[in-house]
Image (cartoon, helix red, strand yellow):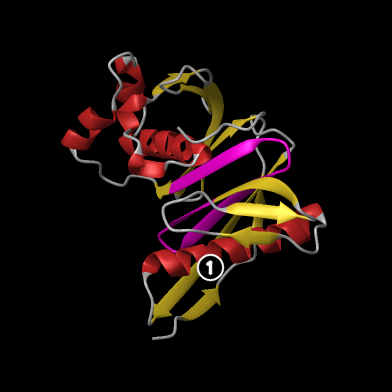
Amino acid sequence: MNLIIDIQTEAVLKKLEHPFLPNDITAGFQPFYVETRGGDLDQSESITGSMLIKKMAEQYMRIPKIDVFTKRYEKPRAFVSEQEVSVSFSHTDHALVAAISRNCNVGVDMERTGRNVHQRLKVRMKHPDERDTLYENLEPIRIWTLKEAALKMIGTGLRKPMNSLIINREDDSLFSVQFDDGKQAKICSFKYQYYWISICYHNNTVSSH
């Protein structure tokens, strides 16, 4: 059966900017409603995520052509004139966010604010060396976005457990993450409209763990 995607855009693409987000990273937010028929959700999300990346590249980076390749359970890959750039995207309730960078490795995650997280999941997310205050002061769903953005940056997604990461808060919207091999990266996390958006980045390529 063929996949049919009906996208009803209700607002224009919005460029996301934040003091803790490096200038080399282009991020965009697109509210939309998408209805899929004849295919699975992963396939439709890959298609719409790729569409947003191409739109952002043309509108914000003056890149007329970017080739995006997606594969289930793997980080998307993108190329501009045969040069690879780092891309990532995330879907949630009627919204899509994406990030592109020529020089940083990026991973992005987004969830609606106030979304309930079960107590057992909170316990499973926490690394033994993480500070209790992180979990006392932040919405659990925001911590989820911090960790998933980091895991998406390295290309594993949730195949690697969240409790393998150590998150430290450096400022209201800036965090650091340490992976289980000792490598570190930064995370810019902020509220936009009704969503928590977290963008993890590292200025050198971070291979999959």
Q: Amino acid at mark 1?
A: Ile
SS label for mark 1: helix
List x then y, in percent, for residue 77.
60, 52
- In this view of the protein, which residue sits in the foreground, 54 or 189? 54
Q: Residue at x 53, y 20 (%)?
A: 171
Position of the N terminus, as image quadrant, is: bottom left
48 relative to 149, above or below: below
Position of the C terminus, as image quadrant, is: top left
List x then y, in percent, for residue 100.
66, 47
97 relative to 46, above or below: above
The answer to whether any part of residue 31 appears in the image is no
Q: Residue at x 64, y 29 (%)?
A: 20
Span shown in magenta: 89-110
Number of marks in the image?
Answer: 1
198 relative to 87, above or below: above
Task: Name the residue tied to disc 1.
Answer: 47
**Which quadrant of the view contains residue 14?**
bottom right
